[in-house]
């Protein structure tokens, strides 16, 4: 049995943050006029895209910490309720509500009783945020910000706006493809199918963002 510590962020969180960062950056490059954009306009676009993702990275990181604290408080509340409740049906309901739906649908009363006895011995987790929580929040921030670079880097090294825009779009699609591939492996499905689906979803969302003026 592995003694390794669980990752700071699960694959779904990591991929979602990257996808969000890519789409945010694309919303700025997509609004760039190929016909009239000059050096100053491109420079402004790059700094605006980076600044926006910096801001949203901070927001996402703060929301991650809030969610983590709330989830821990919810666990403490559940443990407190289990210690004070004497009604068997109520304890079964509390435990069932806390279980994933797949398990809650099939778990038997005997198993619920065993879980109840085991949970009574569990120490309440501290709600106070620790170093790993802040490290995970920084990971959220970093992923959103780093996702900007595949989209804007071509404009730094390629002087022709049209070519830079095409390369930027290709790199964005490749990033989405890699994210979908990772999700496919995590889900136990066919990674390439997930990768292609994520790319298609990303392109569709990008089109919607641009259509709505984002």
Image (cartoon, rainbow, N blue to C red):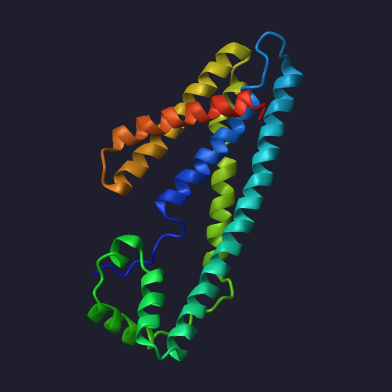
Task: Relative to 107, say whether 12 is above or below.
Answer: above
Residue 15 appears in the figure: yes
Residue at the farthest top position: 35
Image quadrant containing the C terminus? top right
Query: Residue at coordinates 56% horizontally, 41% vertically from top-left?
Result: 146
Residue 172 appears in the figure: no
Percent from the top left, x then y, of residue 156? 63, 24
Task: Relative to 89, say whether 134 is above or below.
Answer: above
Observer-nearest of 26 and 132: 26
Query: Residue at coordinates 68% horizontally, 8% vertically from top-left?
Result: 35
Residue at the farthest right position: 40
Query: Residue at coordinates 41% horizontally, 60% vertically from top-left?
Result: 7
Percent from the top left, x then y, of residue 85? 44, 88
Task: Relative to 171, say whether 166 is above or below.
Answer: above
Instruction: Tell how many labels.
Output: 0
Percent from the top left, x then y, of residue 194? 34, 36
Percent from the top left, x then y, of residue 190? 26, 38
Query: Residue at coordinates 31% horizontally, 80% vertically from top-left?
Result: 115
Q: Is residue 7 left or right of residue 47?
A: left
Image quadrant containing the N terminus? bottom left
Observer-nearest of 13 and 205: 205
């Amino acid at each position: 049995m592995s003694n390794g510590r669980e990752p700071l962020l699960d694959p779904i969180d990591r991929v979602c943050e990257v996808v969000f960062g890519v789409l945010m950056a694309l919303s700025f490059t997509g609004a760039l006029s190929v016909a009239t954009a000059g050096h100053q306009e491109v420079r402004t676009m790059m700094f605006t895209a980076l600044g926006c993702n910096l801001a949203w990275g901070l927001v996402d990181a703060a929301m991650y910490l809030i969610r983590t604290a709330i989830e821990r408080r919810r666990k403490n509340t559940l443990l407190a309720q289990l210690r004070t409740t004497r009604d068997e049906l109520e304890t079964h309901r509390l435990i069932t509500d806390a279980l994933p739906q797949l398990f809650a649908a099939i778990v038997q009363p005997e198993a619920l009783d065993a879980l109840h006895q085991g949970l009574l011995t569990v120490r309440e987790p501290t709600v106070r945020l620790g170093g790993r929580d802040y490290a995970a929040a920084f990971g959220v921030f970093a992923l959103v910000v780093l996702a900007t670079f595949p989209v804007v880097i071509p404009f730094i090294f390629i002087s022709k706006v049209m070519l830079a825009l095409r390369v930027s779009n290709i790199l964005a699609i490749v990033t989405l493809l890699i994210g979908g591939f990772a999700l496919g492996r995590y889900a136990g499905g066919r990674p390439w199918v997930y990768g292609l689906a994520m790319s298609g979803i990303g392109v569709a969302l990008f089109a919607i963002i641009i259509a709505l003026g984002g």
